[in-house]
Image (cartoon, helix red, strand yellow):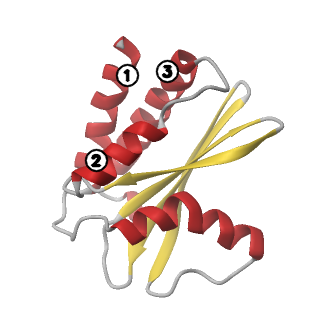
Amino acid sequence: MKYLSCFLIYFSLLANAVTAQSISPTTTDEYQFCTVGYRIQLQTKLDMKQGYSLKDLPEIDHVVRKMEFKALFRKGETKPCAIIMIYSLPRVAPVYYCLPTYDADQALWDLFYSSLESKEENPMDKLHFFSYCIAKAGMYLSNPNWDTK
């Protein structure tokens, strides 16, 4: 529980940094794209979802775990409408998570929360790593010039 609390604190810092500009909340369609559609797009080599673009954020490698972050932008907006988190372990298919905007519908936050449950590995180790990654991503996004790097 202690790690989950730390994870949620770090995540709220990330959400605050991402949503400093007023943007429309993450939609259910955007959430589904982040968690399922993007993976399908990569596997089938489809073009990017129309009306959107992605920007890679620094990835984090730590021992055997890896986390990639991709900021999802609506056309014409300068702040992301969601962040895709891609969690990888050796010999295991990557898992895709969606970090919705701070003011997104509570149902999307509930989906994100329930997606954190893990039966494949030690949940404390996983959440500890997630906290570390989200803290690093939050600090990266808190830089006013992050989108010009």
Q: Residue at x 76, y 75 (%)?
A: 44
Q: Nearer the viewer, residue 145 or 32?
A: 32
Q: Which residue is mark 1?
A: 4
Dot 3 surroundings within 10 Å: few (below 14), some, or many (20 or more)? some
The x and y percentages for residue 102 are 23, 51
Q: Secondary structure at mark 2?
A: helix
Residues at badges 2 and 1 in contact (C-beta under 8 Å)?
no
Q: Between disc 1 and disc 3, whose residue precedes?
A: 1
State the residue at coordinates (33%, 85%): 76
Give the quadrant of residue 135.
top left
* Of the two numbered discs 2 and 1 in the rendering, the one whose residue sits closer to the viewer: 1
Q: Nearer the viewer, residue 72 or 124?
A: 124
Type of amino acid at the residue the image marks with label 1: Leu
Q: Check disc 2 and report the residue beneath it.
A: 15
Give the percent coordinates (x, y) of residue 46. 69, 81
Left or right: residue 40 compared with residue 11: right
Q: Is residue 81 shown above or below 61?
A: below
Q: Residue furthest top?
A: 2
Question: Is disc 1 placed on a helix, strand or loop?
Answer: helix
Q: Residue at x 37, y 22 (%)?
A: 4
Query: Looking at numbered disc 3 in the image, what kind of residue is underneath it?
Result: His
Asked whether the residues under the numbered discs 2 and 3 touch, taking CB atoms below 8 Å apart as contact, a structural biologist would say no
